[in-house]
């Protein structure tokens, strides 16, 4: 009896809150730590909706974007029909280092085309401005290479629905995931319109030795260079002492 | 055991790197060379980006050569004077080499340049070594005696200096230029250059074999240190963890190789080394000639 009351009391405001918000979402972790033993990680985006989701009801789209950086795409050309050399190139600015989009159904099925393009939902909808070579092949090659690296994914696994109001999806982060701030957008789609959205954030950071090495290398390159020389010399000398009679 | 390399920003199997270090160290102990010419291509093959492979390879070469230098120095086999002249050239060459590397990286031709340098340099050196050692093996039967010391054009140059340990009185210009050339190659290829320096000292400068190894190690250690420093400051591509993993396997391998090397005869060893060098050159040449699987590649915009 008492236990039942205690259970009810805190549940009341939560229920009220849930009814005001059509969509509530959260991340399983907000800090991804890249240590020297890092081999990749994953996090889960989960949440609940006010209205039932799934066939006939609302739909959920989750899109995650990593920090952007400029990328050059080069095409190899054959010189005199003999050797292969990097030839024309296109420079893309603001390429996300990580991009994953997933939905209860693919975005192109549940949103009108212009809405999907405006929100950049889907690899083909990414706004990638380029300078240099004009051919659309460069953009296609960029998409292809990023997809192969596992850093760009489109509908690789759908957003799972549990009990018609709960949803979750796993975001895989491979070992080569860039460090920085990540943005996750969760969109609620009802009758081909985005009716609610929530933004979440997480960070990928180097920690421990990996972080110290990278920080020193970047901020004090001269010190880092000297340390590299001393470490290598010491390791070489030490090794020869250890293995001399081996 | 996977290890995250902080500068290469990738995860690699630590035992694979130590194994590569061991194998290359074993061969380098066997043949008495630094082994950088094998190491850099192998690192690129396992997916380390070329700039990181070259810079960390130079750093590894430094570590691998230090113990050899100490040993040779104790035995008095280092001509410090000649070493200093070579080194002066080496510094100039490696500074120029790192600038060249930075330029190549900006225009996106690093991979091509590294491969081309390897094919040309290793192809030439390997070919010469095989030819020379086969001749020597044949000569052993006919036993004609070779002149110890030859005089040629280099002896007419100015700025002569006496190199007591090497028993030479020659101009400093040829050793300076040789040092500069090796320094340049060291910066672009991530090698110490011992396999080129040793024949150059014997055949071009006429140095006695006893001081050649020690003096070349002297030059290799300091040029590799310079390349490491410049690459760390200017390119930011030295991965200290990668270097240490390679050294961990390398120093052990080198000792085993050195023990085995004492049982091989000089000419046979050189012929085998020549074949190995030629093999690496040919495999890299094939990489350039073969139609690529993917015409496109991406890289960070600099």
Image (cartoon, grey):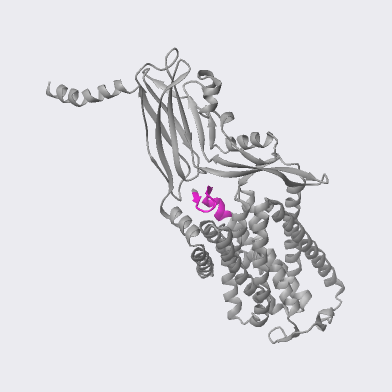
Above/below status of B144 relative to B50: below
Residue lying at 78% horizontally and 65% vertically, measured from the top left: B129
Q: Position of residue B111 (x, y in %)?
A: 68, 51
Q: Position of residue B250 (x, y in %)?
A: 57, 61
Can residue A243 be seen in this snapshot?
A: no
Tell which residue pokes out farthest to the top in this image: A56
Q: Position of residue B91 (x, y in %)?
A: 64, 71
Which quadrant of the structure image shows residue A17?
A: top left
Residue lying at 58% horizontally and 67% vertically, measured from the top left: B62
Instruction: Tally the numbered discs.
Output: 0
Above/below status of A26 relative to A204: above
| Residue B33 relative to residue B11: left or right | right
Q: Position of residue A155 (x, y in %)?
A: 52, 26
Residue range corresponding to the magenta coloring: B3-19
Can residue B90 be seen in this snapshot?
A: yes
Specify whether residue B220 is painted magenta. Answer: no
**Who is closer to the viewer here, A230 or A28?**
A28
| Residue B213 relative to residue A66: left or right | right
| Residue B65 relative to residue A9: left or right | right
**Who is closer to the viewer here, A32 or B83?**
A32
Give the position of the N terminus of chain A as an image quadrant: top left
**Who is closer to the viewer here, B272 or B10?**
B10
């Amino acid at each position: 009896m008492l236990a039942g009351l205690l259970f009810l009391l805190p549940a009341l405001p939560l229920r009220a809150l849930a009814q005001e918000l059509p969509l509530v979402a959260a991340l399983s972790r907000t800090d991804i730590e890249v240590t020297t033993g890092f081999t990749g990680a994953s996090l889960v985006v989960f949440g609940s909706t006010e209205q039932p989701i799934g066939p006939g009801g609302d739909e959920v789209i989750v899109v995650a974007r990593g920090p952007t950086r400029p990328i050059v795409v080069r095409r190899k050309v054959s010189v005199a029909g003999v050797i292969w050399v990097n030839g024309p190139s296109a420079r893309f600015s603001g390429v996300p280092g990580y991009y994953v989009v997933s939905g209860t159904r693919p975005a192109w099925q549940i949103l009108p085309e212009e809405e999907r393009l405006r929100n950049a939902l889907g690899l083909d909808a990414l706004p990638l401005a380029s300078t240099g070579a004009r051919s659309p092949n460069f953009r296609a090659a960029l998409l292809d290479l990023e997809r192969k690296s596992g850093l760009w994914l489109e509908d690789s696994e759908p957003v799972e629905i549990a009990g018609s109001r709960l949803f979750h999806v796993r975001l895989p982060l491979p070992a080569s995931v860039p460090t920085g701030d990540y943005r996750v957008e969760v969109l609620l789609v009802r009758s081909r319109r985005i009716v609610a959205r929530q933004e979440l954030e997480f960070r990928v950071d180097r920690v421990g030795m990996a972080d110290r090495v990278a920080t020193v290398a970047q901020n004090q390159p001269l010190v880092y260079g000297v340390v590299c020389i001393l470490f290598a010399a010491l390791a070489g000398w030490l090794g020869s002492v250890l293995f001399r009679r081996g | 055991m996977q290890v995250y390399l902080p500068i290469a920003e990738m995860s690699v199997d630590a035992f694979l790197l130590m194994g590569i270090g061991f194998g290359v160290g074993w061969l380098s102990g066997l043949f008495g060379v630094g082994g950088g010419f094998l190491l850099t291509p192998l690192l690129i093959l396992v997916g380390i980006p070329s700039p990181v492979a070259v810079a960390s390879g130079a750093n590894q070469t430094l570590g691998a050569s230090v113990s050899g230098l100490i040993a040779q120095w104790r035995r008095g086999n280092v001509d410090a004077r000649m070493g200093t002249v070579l080194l002066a050239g080496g510094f100039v060459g490696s500074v120029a080499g790192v600038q060249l590397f930075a330029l190549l990286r900006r225009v996106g031709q690093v991979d091509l340049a590294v491969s081309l340098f390897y094919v040309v340099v290793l192809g030439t050196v390997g070919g010469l070594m095989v030819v020379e050692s086969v001749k020597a093996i044949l000569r052993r039967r006919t036993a004609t005696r070779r002149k110890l010391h030859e005089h040629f054009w280099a002896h007419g140059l100015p700025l002569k200096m006496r190199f007591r340990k090497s028993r030479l009185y020659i101009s400093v210009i040829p050793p300076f230029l040789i040092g500069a050339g090796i320094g340049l190659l060291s910066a672009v290829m991530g090698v110490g250059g011992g396999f080129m320096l040793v024949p150059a000292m014997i055949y071009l400068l006429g140095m006695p074999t006893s001081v050649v190894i020690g003096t070349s190690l002297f030059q290799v250690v300091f040029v590799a240190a310079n390349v490491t420093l410049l690459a760390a400051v200017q390119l930011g591509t030295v991965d200290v963890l990668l270097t240490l993993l390679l050294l961990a396997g390398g120093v052990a391998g080198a000792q085993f190789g050195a023990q085995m090397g004492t049982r091989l005869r000089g000419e046979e060893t050189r012929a085998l080394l020549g074949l190995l060098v030629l093999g690496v050159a040919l495999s890299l040449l094939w990489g350039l000639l073969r139609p690529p699987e993917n015409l496109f590649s991406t890289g960070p915009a600099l």
